[in-house]
Amino acid sequence: MIKIQNLSKVFRTEEVETKALNEISLEVKQGEFVTIMGASGCGKSTLLNIIGLLDDVTSGSYQLLGNEIRGLKESEKSKIRKQNIGFVFQNFNLIDELSVYDNIELPLIYNNVSASERKKKVEAMAERLAISHRLRHFPQQLSGGQQQRVAVARALINDPKIILADEPTGNLDSKNGNEVMELLTDLHANGATILMVTHSDYDASFSQKTILMKDGIVLSEKLNSRNVNVLA
Amino acid sequence: MYQIRKNKLFTVLNILGLSIGIAGLVFSILYWNDEQSYNAWNPENENVFQVVNDQPRSGFLAYNVMPLGARLKEVSPEVEEYCNFYPAYSGALVEYADKKELVSKVLKSEGSFFSFFPFEFIRSNAKTALKEKNNAAISEETARKLFDDEDPIGKSIKVGETNCVVGGVYRISGKSSVEPAIVIREEFEENIKKNAENWGSHTAFLVVKLKNPANKETVEKQIHQIYVDKQATKEAKEKGISTEAYIKNYGLDIPYLEQLKTARLHSKVNNGYQEGSGNYQFLLIMLGLSVLILVLSIVNYINLATANAIKRAKEVGVRKIIGAAKRQIVGQFLFETVITTSFSILFALVIVELLLPYYNEFLSKNMILSSGQFYIQLIAVFLLTVIAAGVFPALYIANFDVLKVLKGNYSRSKRGTWLRNGMLIFQFAIASFFIIGSYIVYQQVNFMMDKDLGFNGNQVIDIPFNEAKNPADYEMIRNELLRIKGVEEVSSGNFSFGGGGYFTTVFGYKGKDIEVENMSMEFGLFDLMGIQMAEGRKLSEKFASDTINSVIINKTTAALMGEKDPIGKEFDFRDDGDKPGIRRLKVVGVVEDFNSYGPQREIPPMLFYHLKTVSESSYLSRIYVKISPENMEQTISDIEKFWSTKLDTRYPFRYDFVDKSFARTYQGYISQRNLFSLLNFVVILIALFGLFALASYSIQNRMKEIAIRKVLGAETKTLLATLSKQYVVFCIIGFVIALVPAYLLLNKWLENFAYRIDISPIPFITGLFFLMALTLAVVISKAYQATRVNVLNYLKYE
């Protein structure tokens, strides 16, 4: 599903040149739940942004669903992104001026889904994530865990091929964090492909594979022993 | 100060906007002060009243019958003194020894004039200046011109044809409704004597001084009683009906006493005094518009300050935590406003100083930037601006909740957004008002300029005589002029194009009183001016009766007579000239209506007859000459040579092109149109700047939202629509708010015109379209920038 070969990303300012990613290669297959870990500044977020088509590549190759991404125009990337990728952020990134319902609905609007269809989908999704009673609320009126649920709902509403989660529990207490992780595990169990960045070993233990990064290179890859299905 | 340096562009624009607003207000204040200062110096301004009359056919006029003043003094114990004077200044050549000066403001008055306008006397005094019948009082300036350093008292001068002795020199103390350069009494007093029993002709201005101004209404009743006795009863007897029936059928003047104090701006009559009336409506328009512009720029300031405050919220939060009291924070922000406003006022004064000459020319005034009153007002403007612009944002900022601010939750204050949006709507409303308004003004002025005037003044020059000639001289003058190469046609008429006839007369026809302008003329004037006949014939030397009793009326008169076929109809017409009596006149033609006062004025009923027909109008006051376009300068110089050697050796030669002098009658409205267009431009500029700044800040605040939407797949197009939508809504709301005031006020303004356009939807549609286009241009350009930024900057590190 995701195939990255010799990918580099260089940030240039007037004085310094920083190699955020240095000749990285990795692959994520359909249905995998992969965690990227590493210290701050190791390049894991940059990698996630590149995979999410939010950032450009300096050199190397990135194939998403078998298509080379490098060199695509902004509008083409935007199209691929809205059809295939769902984002979950550490700080939720909900739009405060819009209600929960409107927030979840947004990706559907941008994908030109009809109004009646949208209503059906949003309600079904809210049901699934147990936030139906919060649809009329505004993000500021919800707890962090609830907000992240809304963000997950928004990420899933479009049936994306892959979910990118950037420290999804970073702003949550352990109880809410657990809930979100269980949600992700659940999604994975139902076949979703998930790529997650985190600091937390505990969160990483929910995934199948952990990639450890340092200074822009992949340090190690290991398969996690914990089997979620067994515990559940 | 740090803030000022940091936000250079916005600060400069802010100061510029405020400066323009303040400069506009300063201009209006100067105008206001100038108009309000009229007669303010005059210690008698509460006791002196002008007698004006609401006349049955003409409305309010300041002209009075000559015996009224004397009669009123006899019957009224409330009246202390009265003074008749001639309704216009006369121009005269004034001679002393071998010096000659052309003086345009000679006032012919009764001797009591200085008791009503007590100017400061620098030689002699108000009581003795006009003591003798042949005395003349002269202004300081006239004295300097004629006498240099000599003492003028007792010296003989010749004013026109009259020999006088200078009895006093006065200095005009301040703006006055009458500002004569010379006052003489003998000629006018003789005239009064001659007309001591003439209760029919309104030919003089009359001022009275009351012992107590509260008795105004009593005196008005006394005057009315005099009218009943001297006019109504007498006329009724002649017609053989009762006085009541006469008044009912023909009407009677209703006298009204108008206090000198308010005469300049609130007079019932237009130009009731020699120095004219102030245009109160225009003064209010100026004042209103300048206040609007200032408010607009203050709104900009507030909007920017509060929007900016969000950026500075952290600064305030930190200051509060380290112990600043609310008062100190308010003080700091007020101080910033004081500095900005001070800069603005200084800059505004520079603008005013630079533009004042043009403004003076536009208003025909001579205003300067001084006087204590003005500086006090300037300080008031300063304080008001500081309060309006400074206090609100300061309180707004000082009331930020510290905790919320530091947690980063500050930018979503609904209250501040609401207020800013409200102000933005208000700005849209003002801008809409200006766009619609100046469009309608533009339409009306163009309508006026394009109107068919009914005559053609192209290539026709109007040469006035300084002293009227005998009509018998006309043939000689005409023949001499026609001999000059380039002169195509010559005629004469005692009326001007732009100024109309010189006086009106009332005649009765089938039980109706009709007041007509006397338009005496020579044969051929209609041909010369391209004026078309509607029916009947023109006057011609071929008919002997055409210099005796043939007249031509215009269509307006014909309509008033109610006569379908007026040709051949006769009526009696009173002649108050040197051969007084009743003339029996016969209509031989009807002329198409043409405009004699300017396109904004209604065409009055007119009566045309030959110079010799009615003695009251039997003189030669101006010659009309049509000249060929080739070698015009040579032709005019030849005419001048003939004129100043043969016809008028004393006065300098004057002439004017008829079309140009006519255009001057509506020059004021063209200036108003240009002024509105200029203001419109300024207002739109300020409003757009406000919009630009506000959109910048608001979009800045929404960057995170924009980034999220982009991540979720919003295309640029969709994003632009999302961002512009609210401004389009505000624009429409503002426009709707402006609709009704714009319609009502412009309708009011259009009432000034006899011939006016109807307000059509076009200015409104154009206005909305224009405003919307500008709004979208500003917002979309700003929003487009926003959609181009890298979303990563806003998603991660909030």
Image (cartoon, coloured by chain):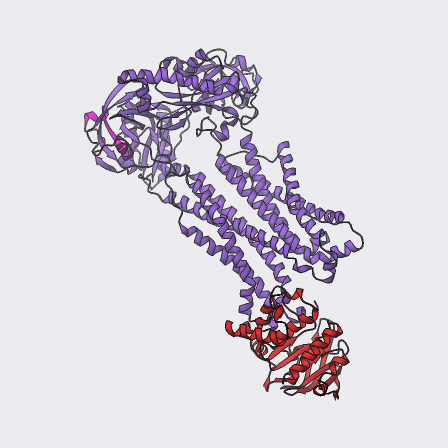
Chain colours: A red, B purple
Q: Is residue A182 above or below residue B557?
A: below
Q: In the image shown, does B681 or B515 lie closer to the viewer?
A: B515
Q: In the image shown, does A107 or B259 lie closer to the viewer?
A: A107
Q: Is residue B128 above or below residue A197?
A: above
- Residue A67 at least partly seen: yes
State which region is magenta: B536-560
Kindly give the residue lying farthest to the right in the view shown.
B322
Coordinates of residue B592 in the picture (x, y in percent):
27, 37
B780 sits left or right of B93 in the view: right
Q: Quadrant of residue B746?
A: top left
Q: In the image shown, does B411 or B158 lie closer to the viewer?
A: B411
Q: Quadrant of residue A182?
A: bottom right
Q: Quadrant of the C terminus of chain B?
A: bottom right
Q: Quadrant of residue B454?
A: top left
Instruction: Identify which residue is drawn at 65% across, 81% down.
Output: A187
Q: Is residue B449 above or below residue B269?
A: below
Coordinates of residue B324 in the picture (x, y in percent):
78, 51
Coordinates of residue B179 in the picture (x, y in percent):
50, 24
